Amino acid sequence: MTLNKELIDILVCPKCKGELELLSGEKGLGCESCKVVYPVKDEIPIMLVDEAVPADKWENK
């Protein structure tokens, strides 16, 4: 099962309200403005600012 496209289209970054991009493998949603990734666990986006991972550290996962 994959993430619902309609859900992804309406989600925004909780910090800056900017657009999010689904990363390859559907493991995270990236915010280009804030340079963070919100992880996706069990097909559920974790949209908490405290759970965001800096994009430069995410790429190394």
Image (spheres, helix red, strand yellow):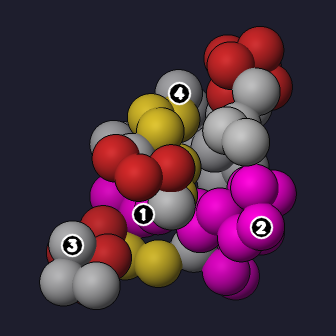
* Residue 5 in picture, x, y percent from top left: 68, 19
Whole-number angstrom distance, CA of label 3 to CA of label 4: 19 Å
Viewer-nearest of discs 3 and 2: 2
Q: Earlier in the sequence, mark 2 or mark 4?
A: 4
Where residue 54 appears, x then y in whole percent? 37, 76
Q: Nearer the viewer, mark 2 or mark 1?
A: 2
Q: Which mark is residue 55?
A: none
Residue picked out by circle 4: 19
Cα gap from disc 3 to disc 2, whole angstroms: 20 Å
Classify residue 25 as left or right of residue 58: right
Q: Give the residues drawn in magenta, as a range.
A: 35-51
Name the residue beneath numbered marker 1: 36
Q: Is residue 47 visible?
A: no
Answer yes or no: do the residues labelled 2 and 4 have beta carbons within 8 Å?
Answer: no
Horizontally, is 51 left or right of 53 in the view?
A: right
Q: Sequence order check: which comes first, mark 3 or mark 4?
A: 4
- C-alpha span from label 2 to label 4: 22 Å
Residue 10 quadrant: top right
Residue count near mark 4 (Cα–Cα under 10 Å), binned few <14, some 14–19, many ≥20: some
Tag on residue 42?
A: 2
Give the mark, 3 or 1, whose residue is nearer the N terminus. 1
Amino acid type, residue under disc 2 in the picture: Asp
Tally of marks: 4
Is residue 2 on the magenta stretch? no
Is 40 one of the magenta-colored residues? Answer: yes
Task: Compare marks 3 and 2 and give the one earlier in the sequence.
Answer: 2
- What percent of the width, then of the height, locates residue 24? 34, 47
Give the labeled residue for mark 3: 59
Helix, strand or loop under label 4: loop
